Amino acid sequence: MTASDANRLPLDRAIPVRELGLIAMDMDSTAITIECIDEIADFAGVKAEVSAITASAMRGELDFQESLRRRVACLEGLSTDVLRGVYEARLQPSPGLDELMRFAREHGVKTLLISGGFTYFTERMRARFGYTYTRAN
């Protein structure tokens, strides 16, 4: 089954709302339209380096921990002003996120935002959208 097929599942295969206990989602390029670490790197002038490390990890040449360590090393010494700049100027929710979060609240469904990125962003997303739980680095 492809991702495209999953988007077209018949309604009779949908999970009844009363059976939903938790909606979990990734943050970068799922709940939001950007990859935060790439945008931080862009602000810091090291986007090409960070993107190359990310691409290497996506090809399986680096594991997640090593990839994260190398990318964070490229960003060493940045102030929180850069994080704030990314959050305020570039972070946009993906289409439908507001509606999904409202639906979850109205139906008592817990929500979990997961990120391989930074708590700076997940905590602000929690405050803005009302996630029940967040997990990040």
Image (cartoon, rainbow, N blue to C red):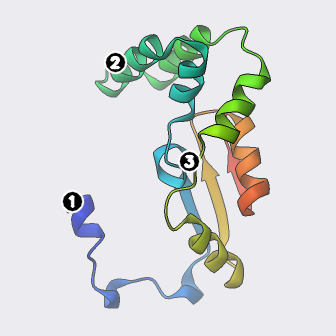
Three-letter amino acid code at the position of disc 3: Met
Q: Which of marks 3 and 2 precedes in the sequence? A: 3
Where the N terminus falls, by quadrant?
bottom left
Three-letter amino acid code at the position of disc 1: Thr
Instruction: Count every numbered label the image shows and give the total.
Output: 3
Q: Residue at x 59, y 89 (%)?
A: 18
Q: Residue at x 64, y 58 (%)?
A: 112
Q: Position of residue 9 (x, y in %)?
A: 28, 78
Q: Marks 3 and 2: in contact by CB < 8 Å?
A: no
Q: Position of residue 127 (x, y in %)?
A: 79, 55
Where the C terminus falls, by quadrant?
top right
Q: Which residue is mark 2?
A: 56
- Of circles 1 and 3, which is in front? 3
Q: Position of residue 81 (x, y in %)?
A: 77, 24
Q: Position of residue 105 (x, y in %)?
A: 71, 77
Q: Is residue 14 above or below residue 78?
A: below
Q: Which of marks 2 and 1 precedes in the sequence? A: 1
Q: CA distance from mark 2 to mark 3?
A: 21 Å
The label shown at residue 27 is 3
Locate residue 102: give its quadrant. bottom right
Foreground residue among 88 and 9: 88
Q: Marks 2 and 1: in contact by CB < 8 Å?
A: no
Q: CA distance from mark 1 to mark 2?
A: 24 Å
Q: Is residue 80 above or below residue 87?
A: above
Q: Is residue 113 above or below residue 36?
A: below
